[in-house]
Amino acid sequence: MSYRAPVSEIRFLFDHVVGFGQVAATERFAEATPETVEAVLSEAGKLCEDILSPLQRAGDLHPAQLENGIVRTSPGYAEGYRAIADGGWIAIAADPKYGGMGLPMAMTTAVNEMMSAACLSLQLAPLMTQGQIEALEHHASDAIKDLYLPKLISGEWMGTMNLTEPQAGSDVGALTTKAEPKGDGTYAITGQKIYISWGDNDITENVCHLVLARLPDAVPGTKGISLFLVPKRLPDDNGVPGVANGLKVVSLEHKMGLHGSPTAVMQYDGATGWLIGQENDGMRAMFTMMNNARLGVGVQGIGVADGAYQHALAYAEGRKQGRTEHNTITDHADVRRMLATMKADTFAARAIALANAVAIDMETATGHTDWSTRAALLTPITKAFGTDTGIDVAELGVQVHGGMGFIEETGAAQYSRDVRVTAIYEGTNGIQSMDLVGRKLMDGGEAAYRLLDEMEADAEAARTALPDLAEAVWQACETLRETTEWMVAHGAQDRFAGSVPYLRGFARVLGAHFHLKAARADRGGKHERLATFYIHSLLPEHVGLLTHARQGADDLYALSMDDLAA
């Protein structure tokens, strides 16, 4: 099955649903004209269809290997990565001063989705580099920027992020990697990091690791963590990589999926590193990269959802069965239900992610805090709902295939295996939900209420043309508002107990809002019909989700560990 990049669908969302026009209207992003957007998305679509999509199965069947200390990437990946780098697709949003395009994050988000749908294992490489570029732009010294950013932006060098250690996963503050000052402005980094995506490769001439470590006498916990840039090979003043640094790949993980992406255990033995940002302020700098990655990982889930949907649709349209209109399984009600659910949820998740990116762009262009709080609110929703959607849609894709979905040769199961980790890395989806009801509601819910006000105003405006759909969305917004008020009024443990269903319910209602906007822009068309299905059949889930969210922690902790014993 050939992948088809959803360029026209993304353009529809830009033009009618997520407010991209206001980004293009700013002075900062004036170059993002309709012609430029069309050209960029079309060319990226061709890259994904013609070059990246054929690599999807190759990476799964021929995983990256560690041979005598050298990582050997999957067949065709070097050529695929070079096409990404040479086309400038790593640095769409990066600073033009260092070779980037300086275009909106919304355009990067759209391109990343298409690359994820085509070949997620390979797309992870530029995603990690994009996050490192943003972290260095915000926190590195001018000397580091001048030396590293042009190489990262061109794709000559690749970037990674090193947080997790064997004893320090989500509890990053438990890390033990050490950084000793060497007296010349550099530091000796010693420790082990695990789960490092694209920790090494045989494609680029250097790999640049952002590593969290602890200085001598630093305070315990996250407040005593600093961030260091540690290259695989030490570059000279002209950016030419020279001697090998004191680091190595110990092993590559044997994973459920993403076989083409080498996930490394990294060992640092007095490796030379440079401080990024201030001492003991590493988490703030790393979170610049993490927030970039959380949007990116949510988009990975959406890309896989689209790829899995297209794969399942093509199979269903060709699977002959029964004497019906098309003589295929697409005429069976349950198959039609699955296909409609896959498409409707992918649309909702894509709209949420693009709206998130638009908020980031508007913050960049205007500096207004309302946009920064909107972006912060949407980030955990994008990450969790985007990846949950990828998992759910990929699972439905296997089911559409029936018995053939369980057969590896069809490729349906690969989408499910590949996407499963997206709900885990860059902060598990449970952590995203706790962030939503914790930090993101610390303003008393004001950012959430401002968004709800807009959603209800749009529903009111749709009442004349689409009264049935508008009423359902308006009522759902009220239920979400009441649940948000409950969250604000209760303590952390009660909020955390209901945080996952709250985030899911929030996303359900937000998805309905965007579907309704699409329906208004496409009266009588496919978007109105898809919105009708979503609002009538999927939106009602928000009632149960938000009821669950308001139950608090008492029933949960009334169950003792003895009660939960097998």
Image: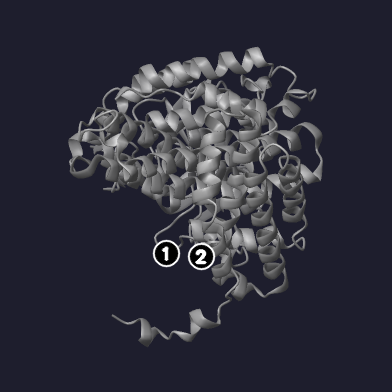
Image position of 191 (left or right of 509): left
Asked whether 171 or 190 is in front, the reply is: 171
Asked whether 329 or 451 is in front, the reply is: 329
Residue 434 occupies which quadrant of the picture?
bottom right
* Rendered image coloring scheme: one colour
From the image, tell me which residue sits under label 1: 167
How far is the residue under mark 1 from the one under mark 2? 7 Å
Disc 1 + disc 2, Cβ < 8 Å: yes
Camera sees residue 244: no
Q: Amino acid at mark 1?
A: Gln
Asked whether 443 or 406 is in front, the reply is: 406
Image coordinates of residue 140 in percent, x first then y, are 66, 38
Image position of 38 (left or right of 118): right
Label placed on residue 174: 2
Image coordinates of residue 318 in percent, x first then y, are 25, 27
Q: Amino acid at mark 2?
A: Ala
Q: Residues within 10 Å of mark 2 (few under 14, many from 20)?
A: some
Q: Residue at x 57, y 57 (%)?
A: 505
Q: Earlier in the sequence, mark 1 or mark 2?
A: 1
Camera sees residue 42: yes
Image coordinates of residue 436 in percent, x first then y, are 62, 58
